Image (tube, helix red, strand yellow):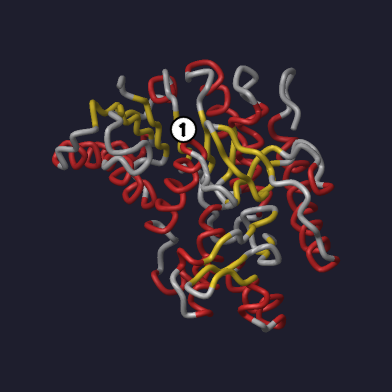
Amino acid sequence: SSPSRVLITGAAGQIAYSLIFLVARGELLGPNHPIILHLLDVPFCKEGLRGVELEVQDGAYPLVHSVVATTNVKEAFTGVDYALLVGAFPRKDGMERKDLLKTNAAIFKEQGAALSNYSSRNVKVVVVGNPANTNAKIAQVSAPNIPKENFSALTRLDHNRARSQIALHLNTSVSNVHNVIIWGNHSSTQYPDVSHAFVSGSNGKKTVVEAVNDNNYLQDTFITTIQQRGAAIIKARKLGSAASAAKAIVDHMHDWIFGTPEGEFVSMGVYSDGSYGIREGLIYSFPVTTKDGRYNIVQGLSISEFSRKKMDLTARELEEEKDAASEFIQSNQSRL
């Protein structure tokens, strides 16, 4: 088959250093699908980017047809089929969230326009750089030529963390834990929900609520563990999540492209169509199923009063972020 073009931004950074080599090995598009890697970073990181390009060459990856390593946005985005937008301006000590939004609004406005002008019309986009949901929204409104459904934000890392914590708690394999949900924003207001999750095993299926049999844990410790996991990793490693984030990016895109197993759903930050009372147009994490390169928000799940409050709280944060970012990107054609 002809090679697909896969763009990774922030390509000289930490997450990309794990991600690039997973993609090069075929974890994203499969073991027989050739790729052209597009690697973008800012001019300040030019030397580091060159080093990564040399390592890709030295890996002698059979699937890597060629590499476009550049600091030029137009060159990076031209003809791209899959865009993994990892790069963003990091929050620095003493920086207000509004300042972070302002800096990243400019980056993702430019990248959204580049997707619209230079990339494939069917490009699939996942935004990883924080604040991921709002950055995805900014890119989406800045890309009039790309369907809004083609933009997503990464909440798969939170989803994977939630599955793993339940597996650890029950002393079972993570492959036995199904249908956890991350609702809302990829932030500390996200709501990890196990009300519809189940555990499979040699004794058949059990709901997670039944298997764990401890509502205090599920409605308190479990939730805060997932919400604060990123901070716990920074505290332990003195660096942010990288390998686990890269794995989650690959999981997110792979499932979007190839589909979820029957009866299973995953969490993706996607354009809200108003499902579950979430304001239309927010990029909000929902449970989704995927098939033939398209996702569908899972419908008809019962929502408890406890869940409703948590889901609305994280939606409010997203609305506030969107309003704050809107000031920075208003132009004739874009309004969040």
Q: Position of residue 323 (x, y in %)?
A: 78, 41
Q: Quadrant of residue 57?
A: top left
Residue ranking furthest to the front:
203
User: Residue 80: x percent and y percent?
Assistant: 43, 24
Residue 102 point in image, percent of width and height: 64, 41
- The residue that appears at 42% across and 18% down in the rendered structure is 79
Which quadrant of the figure has residue 308? bottom right
The three-letter code of the residue at mark 1 reads Ala
Q: At 65% across and 34% down in the image, what residue appears?
A: 138
Q: Is residue 202 above or below residue 268?
A: below
Residue 272: x percent and y percent? 74, 40
Please rate how many residues cluster around mark 1, counting C-alpha atoms within 10 Å: few if below 14, some from 14 to 19, many from 20: many
Above or below, 62 against 318 in this view is: above
Residue that badge 1 annotates: 83
Quadrant housing the N terminus? top left
Give left or right: position of 331 versus 153. right
Q: Looking at this view, is 35 or 198 the one in front?
A: 198
Q: Quadrant of the C terminus?
A: top right
**213 left or right of 49 in image:** right
Q: Secondary structure at mark 1?
A: strand
Residue at the image point whose x is 52% and y is 75% from the top: 203
- Image height of 190 relative to 78, above or below: below
Taking 239 as reference, is 107 above or below it?
Answer: above
